[in-house]
Structure formats: structure tokens, C-alpha cells
Image (tube, rainbow, N blue to C red):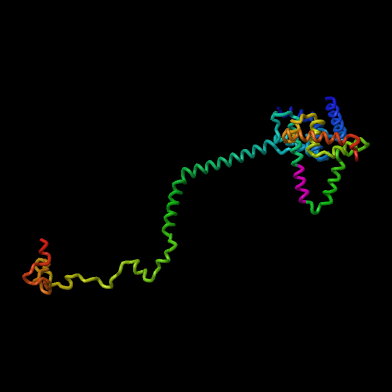
Amino acid sequence: MAAEDVQRGLEQLHPASFAWAVVCCHGDPAEAEEVLQSAYLKVLERRARFAGRSSLKTWFFSVVRRTAVERARRRRLRQAKLLLWRRREAGAREVRADSAGPHHEAAVGERARRIRAALGRLSRRQRQVLELVFYHDLTVAEAAAVLAIGVGSARVHYARGKTRLLAALTPENDDE
Amino acid sequence: MNEERRERELLKGVLTEAHRATRRRTPAFGRVWARAAAARRPPTRYRAGRGLAAAAVALALTVTAALWTVGGHRGSELDRALTIAAALDDWQAPLDFLLATPGREWLEAPAEWPLAAPEPWALAPELLDPAGGHFDAGPSAPGLVDPTPPGSDPPDSHRR
């Protein structure tokens, strides 16, 4: 696939890529934008190459997830170094990140509140698998490829996450 | 089947609603791509320079190895042999001190007499025959005593 074709494909994927980056960044859109930029940089510098073994979407989502993990790891290291004398600032940043999440603005009204609470009950893996399957229309096998886990493991996360989310969304279980 | 589809629609709707704010905040592709392109490291010249440097180092290593193989190898063998020989010359056995006994120096060189031993004819010049220089060691020679008594066989006559 030529570089121009990859760029065109990424442009079409861009909104979905950003949504996926937000999930990978625990709901922080500013960090998601940085992650997306770093992922594009990897493509430009050919550190990430599309070999055509999967769909462009599966491949690039995998790149985004790896980039988010790398950035989070670096950030944790930096924060650990600065923890002694910047504890207060680091705490404030986390609060900012949480409050600036994509669901912050959606938290207007009863339904949005319930959705946020229901999604909050999922584990990180369950949330990612459900996002990939239901929001990005990937198969479970493709979601497993994006998350670099086995298909069996992805199926377990999918089934448990779906059950838990449905249970949380039914009114009788809404104890929030 | 209908139940499964209903669940699917429900979950899709939930996640779509959860991402409503995300969609509004999605940055423009051109802006993010342009920032990534600006952050890109200088590609061609940097890599070409790095390739040239690697080639120069490889060439220098090859030339050095060739020179060492062709020219310096024999010389170094000789040097090594000389070094080993010198080391062997200086070598001392670790138990050599046990041999350092008193009087050892007398064993390290042949004994030397204070005076040279006199030649026999210097002691008895009359034994020399003045006519032909013939040395006569017979019993008639003055100063010499024949050990065998008269009339008996000489000591080794029975061997003949």
C-alpha cells in the first residue's frame, strides 16, 4: 500500500481513531490527541508499517493502543520521579484528566449518568473489547488482534463485559 | 436472535452516546497530521550521513585487518617468540630457594688450584734421554724402584 493511500485511509479513520485513543487514554482527550499525533509520526517515519496482514483499521488501532501504553509508561516514570515534591500538582492533573473525560459533558441528564456509571463498572479490558466490537464494529477476533491478546481471552472479556453492562443498564440494578 | 440484536443495538447506542462529547472534540486530521510531520526527524540527509559514516568505519576496519594479515603477522610471531624466550630466561622456579644452601657457590664453578700441577719431567729431568729424547721408564733408571723381586714374572705376564 502506497504512503498516499495509507494517509487517505487514516484520514477517513481519523474520528474513529480519536475515539479509540480517548478510550486508551482513560478518557483524556488532550492526551488522546498527543497519542494520535505520535501514532501518525510513527507512520510517517515508517516505524509502524502497514503490511496488509489485517485491515487498516485493525492495524492502526493496534498502533494507537501501543503508543498510548508507551506514553502512559513514560508518564508514570516521570511522575514517580517527581512524586516527592510535586505530589499536589500530579493529583490535580489526575483530577483534571478525569473531569475532562468524554463522559463529563455527557453527564447531563439521567441517562448519561446511568451510562457513565455502567461503563465505570467494567474492567479496562472489558471496556476496550466492548468499544471495539460495538462502537467500532470490529469482530472479536479483530479486537483481540488490536489488544494483542488471544481470541479466547477476548471472548471471555466480551461475554463478561456485555453481561455486566446490560445488568448495570437495567433500571432495577441502577442503584447509583 | 432478536434478543441478541436488541442487546447489540442497546450497547451500540450506549457507547455512541458516551462518545458524543468525544466526537465534538475530535481535532481536525490535517492539524494533527501536520504537527506529526513537523515533529518528524530530518529523514534523508541524516540517514544518508549515517550510512556514509558506517561505510567509512567498515572500510577502515577492512584495511586494518588486511594490513595486519599481510604485513604485521610474521613480525608479530617473531616478537612473540623473542618475548617468550626472554621470559623463560628470567624464569625462576618457585622452590629455587631450597637449593640456596651454604657452600653452593663452590658447586657452581670448577675447582681452581692455586698452583699448576708440575709436569713429571720437570721433577726428574734426568729421566729424559739426552741423545734421542727417548723416555726410558725401565728399572735401570735411577731413582725408580722395580716392585717385582728378581727372578719372578712381571705382574701381568700371566695374561699373555
Name above or below for residue A78 compared with residue A6: below
Q: Which residues are magenta?
A: A71-81
Residue A94 placement (x, y as % from top left): 84, 45
In the rendered image of this protein, does residue A57 appear above or below residue B78? Answer: above
Q: Is residue B74 left or right of residue A74?
A: left
In the rendering, at what x and y percent does residue A137 appear?
Answer: 80, 29
Q: Quadrant of the C terminus of chain A?
A: top right
Direction front: furthest residue: A172
**Outermost left residue:** B151
Residue A58 is situated, as x and y percent measured from the top left of the image, at 75, 31
Residue at the bottom extreme of this rendering: B143
Q: Is residue A59 left or right of residue B155?
A: right
Q: Which quadrant holds residue B6? A: top right
Residue B24 in view here: no
Q: Nearer the viewer, residue B160 or B116?
A: B160
Residue A74 in magenta?
yes
Residue drawn where x is 60% and y is 40% of the image: B54
Count of labels shown? Answer: 0
Q: Main secondary structure of the magenta part?
A: helix
**Residue closer to the observer: A35 or A104:** A104
Left or right of B20 on screen, residue A55: left
Q: Residue furthest right?
A: A109
Q: Is residue A92 visible?
A: yes
**Could you say which quadrant of the image residue B148 lies in?**
bottom left
Q: Please state, as top left, top right, bottom left or bottom right, where the N terminus of chain A lies in the image.
A: top right
Query: Looking at the image, which residue is at 43% across and 59% down?
Result: B91
Q: Nearer the viewer, residue B18 or B144?
A: B18
Residue B55 colored in magenta in the image = no
Residue B158 at x, y percent in the picture: 10, 63
Q: On the image, which quarter does residue A175 sit in?
A: top right
